[in-house]
Amino acid sequence: MSRLRFTRVATPSTPASNKVELFVDTADRKLKTIDDNGVISVLNNDGLQDRNIITNGGFNIQQRIAVASTAIAGITTTTRGGVVADRWAVTTSVATNLNWQQVDAGGAPESLLNSRYYGSIISATAGKKVMLSQFIINAEMVHLRGGKVRVSVKTSQKVGSEGQTYKLGLIQLNSAGTIDVSPAFLSGAFSTVTGTDPAWGTNLAAITPDASPTGENGTIAGAYLEILSTLAWKRSSAVFTVPTNARNLVVVLFANATGGVTDNLSVAEFQLTQGPDIVDFREAPFDETVTRCQRFYNKSFALTTVPIQNAGINTGEIKAVAGKAGAVINSCIFAWRYPTAMFRTPPTVIIYNPAAANALGRNLTGVADLGATALTAQLDSSAMAISTGVAATAVGDQCGLHYTADAEIVT
């Protein structure tokens, strides 16, 4: 019988070109390799080390806005208010004429792309700088503190000049911040000046990428990995050491300069994985991604239906039966449970009438609106709405309303 016996050593220096070295690390007694780019791979991973910490990194869940190119609502120059695909938000230097599109490449696969979906940030008129970001809650990153992570993303400059510079970064909410409470995202408007990085809000600070291993398809410059855009899909990544006292993390990708009038930057396969290993993107199970997204936003509408007043009857609305006749309070009581416990208690809930352009409950039997409709008993897992009846309301009438519940971090 043959066997290999290793003596534990400190991490060796980067080997010569085209060489890979195998060793057992003194620090943690794990078998590892180091390649000629300085990338260290652990051969006996603990748990789901390759799991993507980012939620919806494949941009396949999009509950709020249409999949077609659509103006980004709520976008500003200082906040994460421009939510696009679930958990993702866009900030810009000019808060007008900026669209988002979800592209389904399942029927027409694109070269060098592993994911079915990707997102596109599209300038509609004036050029502007753009930034895409996701805030990672403490429970999903606390195990990373004091260790190394790799942040990676694929980009494609679908429209506009190739060779534009984008910066990939990892931001921490430091120990002076409050866990899972975001301060103002930027301390001032996202500058239009070329080379001027965002001014992060109080207690937010960029984590400088490790010098070794060197960045993948990019150049480490200051606190970010600089990426030169290409039409072809390209994966770029860098390794970061997470501070031991970090409270939260934010992944960011932003433009270094104002883009062209109709630029289209497409983004796919955004990942944050434990350890310095380069990890190929694999989409998480659909149900897992949906559940993780629904902690921050869920609705009574079908998953792909954009919430709107007057969406129609039998479109997923919450239903109840009138218990009192006439124009009396508490005529119809709607109660529902969310599909998963929400991140914040209470979430921000909006009521939608399924058959009219107002925020009232609807008498589906009587084909008429109910009276005043108000939320009550809001928890992280459930909510209730109470509607006053109208003169024609009868006991036993079927009633309905839609809702959205929002707990996203957008400041």
Image (cartoon, rainbow, N blue to C red):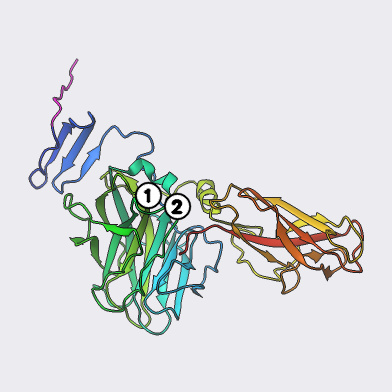
Report crowding for label 1: few under 14, some 14 to 19, many 20 or more residues within 10 A (C-alpha): many
Label 2 vs 1, first from the N-terminus: 2
Magenta stretch?
1-9
Residue 208: percent from left, percent from top: 23, 56
Circle number at residue 180: 2
Given residues 238 and 101, the one toward you in this image is: 238
Q: Amino acid at mark 2?
A: Asp
| Label 1 secondary element | loop
Q: Amino acid at mark 1?
A: Arg
Q: Residue at x 48, y 62 (%)?
A: 85
Query: Horizontally, is 14 left or right of 57 in the view?
Result: left
The residue drawn where x is 46% and y is 66% is 103
Residue 389 in picture, x, y percent from top left: 86, 65
Would residue 236 be visible to someone looking at this image? no
Q: Secondary structure at mark 2?
A: loop
Magenta-colored segment: predominant secondary structure: loop
Look at 63% across and 48% down and name the residue there.
Answer: 381
State yes or no: discs 2 and 1 in contact (Cβ < 8 Å).
yes
Q: Residues within 10 Å of mark 2 (few under 14, many from 20)?
A: some
Horizontal placement of 91 versus 361: left or right? Answer: left
Residue 378, position as x, y percentages in the image: 66, 53
- Inspect this view and state whether residue 249 appears: yes
User: Which is nearer the eye, 254 or 386?
Assistant: 386
Residue 259's image quarter?
bottom left
Which residue is disc 1 drawn over? Answer: 247
Closer to us: 195 or 347: 347
| 4 in the magenta segment | yes
Q: Quadrant of the N terminus?
A: top left
Q: CA distance from mark 2 to mark 1?
A: 7 Å
Residue 213, percent from left and from top: 18, 49
